[in-house]
Amino acid sequence: MSVIGQSVRRTALDRFASGRGRYVGDIDLPGMATVAFVRSPVAHAELLGVDTEAARAMPGVLAVITGDDIASFAPQPSLWNPPGQNHSGLKALATDRLRYVGQPFAAVVAVDRRTAEAAVRAIVPQYRALPIIADMDAALRSAAPRLYDHWSDNIVARPRWQAGDIAAAFDNAALVVSDRFTTQRVHPCSLEPRGVVVAPDLDGESVTVWLSTQSIHQVRAGISECLGLPEHRIRVIAPDVGGSFGMKACIYGEEVILAFLTHHVGRPLRWIETRAEAFVASTHGRDERVDLAVAFGPDGRIRALRSTIVLDKGADPYATSMGTAWISGAVMTGPYRIDTIDIEALAVVTNKTPTGAYRGFGQPEANFALERALDMAAPRLGLDPAELRRRNLVAPSEMPYPTPTGIVLDSGRYADLLDTTLERFGYGDARPAQSSSRRRTGVGIACYAETTNFGPSPLCKLIGVDSGGFDITAIRMEPSGHVRVFVGQTPMGQGIETVLMQVAADELGLPIEDISIVHGDTVSSAYTAYASGGSRGAGVAGGSTALAARRLRARILRWGAHLLDALPESVRFMQGGVEVIDVPSRRVGIAEIAAAAYKAFSTPEGLEPGLEDRAAYDPPALAIAYGCVVAEVAVDIDTGKIAVERIVFGHDCGVQINPAIVEGQVIGGLAQALGATLFEEVRYDADARPLTLSLQDYLLPLASDVPHVELVHFETPSPFSPIGAKGVGESGTIGVPAAIANAVQNALGAASPLVTLPLTGERVLAAL
């Protein structure tokens, strides 16, 4: 019986629930010392000197280094390098200039944490204040100071997409809707902050690095580039990872510094990020502005779209460069038929903590703008918001449908899913139901298309991603018949190990209990070119796992035929073994085949002893998941407080390998989106000083904030996947902000348009 489509219970749940997870902070090595970092207290200043004398003299301090001590290091590499991109050239510790509050400029090694923190307080920087670039508007002013003297301005890069006669389309439009839509800066806030443990190997030239990351191979490559140490001398291990949401996708300076210092002091070292550090030292997400204009014909068809996207990258573009803005531009047309476009994306540097990857990666920002614009247009066109969307959705007969930005909508039943979701919600009855009391209700909808299965490698090269888009899986059947699957993906709460076990078990006809996944270690794991991100685990790693298992299955068939003294074409694979097609009673079990393959007393011609194989899967194109969100809200017009009462969420991620995990991913993403929609925000003052420094300042959603959620499942296999799977990791984050904002606008009626997130009580009252 196939285990694909079964809600198999996730592995390791009992271990985590009973507190037996093993995280970086749990690693304790003999002779381990502690590292602490000295961070900039100002947003922008010339660094004139660093007085480390008092710290060096403190008992228990083993070493102190500054930027001058790492002059030979290479700058931290950027994963995304689109054509024309400017590079900062910054290294792991600041040298001549401090560019944001929290930037490290010195590091201390001490026998324990208390001593290290005391030494940090004893280090005094001398600096001269420089003009502040507080936000993207300040960065774009013609007279703005430059954050990097070797740049001509503060723009990282500015790709552009153009198609059709944009001027004629807008000149002849029956209606043009335009506005500025802003998505605020947010903090990923994983339960486990970042952490690094390093140890020098006995050969004196190699290093082992344990860290909380979703990108073991990419971190290894980054440390190698920065230190000039060959990759084979660097071992990176990711133990249990307590959440990431994109924040742990890139290499950080702390990892480079610890890898260097462990040889400098000759002992293992540990750095565990505090929650206060996390708010200024780890990458933030979002912080994007979309100026959008949409031209409509009299029938409600979208004739053209014009957009300028500006992303605040903070002080250093190294973390995914301008990838977030690039994706926003690439998906700006959503699931709709829009052929004429002019879209420009800019990323700018400011004196803030760098932004990087965050769940959704530019897609919620674009969706918020487009779906709000559609709701703003609907009443002016005399159409219901659902009907306006229905008229513009790409039809199945048009797929695969290439959008003018180069994205291919591979498969789906967009309008059918919209109608089914609306029917399940009871949209026809609920939409007009507004109260005239002080508590008003409203209903809003939003459709979305999500890029998943990130790759392929040629696309990565085209858009400047400095890696491939493939995954490799190695698979080995042990002499007992148990199977080990070696993958490069990293579990971080998404359940990928269970999904890959199901794929392998299904292909090999084995119980899932006979499959185990090996991951999280560059020495033993298979290679992944783009790591765990881009909603690619199930689709890309699942694809390579399926292909590797099929090759192993063919090898097992050859061994089975040999043991049965039959021709290979006369046998077939069956649950638990191999049998002769015409004589089913002649069969041999998996355990017997495995034992024979490892004893090799008699080996089939053309085969070698053992049962091992591998496969690489590089997707031919992105797979596009899609969905529809319908939300009902209640708004207290005295306080502006929003309560989300109910959500019906329709989605299609292709073949669902494990429906329970799919449901968890959608609802988890939805909860995260609720926080970003209603109250999460990393705030700075006019001098770029952070105002959000703890969980007292940063409101996260509680269980009581999450409404009843009803899911509607469609399954349209992707033609670009060997198992038909699309990704689902970011689906829940994309359409929710726009659906809630549309519902709130519906409740408020004739109020100023809501175009800025989060939808705080103050903003709701201002709109009224």
Image: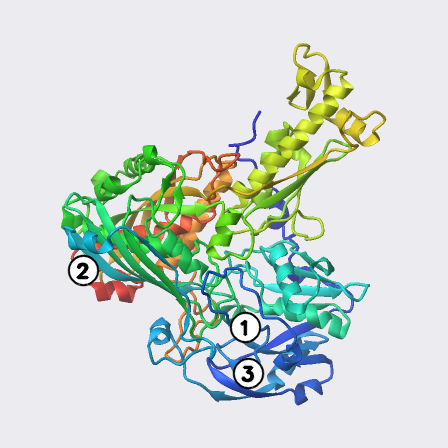
Residue on which the image places disc 2: 751
Q: Amino acid at mark 2?
A: Ala
Question: Which residue is at 30% across, 37% downward?
Answer: 415
Residue on which the image places disc 1: 89
Q: Earlier in the sequence, mark 1 or mark 2?
A: 1
Query: Circle 1 — which element?
Result: loop
Residue 4 lies, in percent from the top left, at 54, 32
Report which quarter residue 66 is drawn in. Answer: bottom right
Q: Amino acid at mark 3?
A: Asp
Give me the C-alpha separation between circle 1 and circle 2: 47 Å
Sort mark 1 into few (<14), some (14-19) or many (20+) by Cα contacts within 10 Å: some
Sort mark 2 into few (<14), some (14-19) or many (20+) by Cα contacts within 10 Å: some
Residue 195 shows which numbered tag? none
Residue on which the image places disc 3: 96
Q: Amino acid at mark 1?
A: Gly
Sort mark 3 into few (<14), some (14-19) or many (20+) by Cα contacts within 10 Å: some
Residue 520 lies, in percent from the top left, at 65, 51
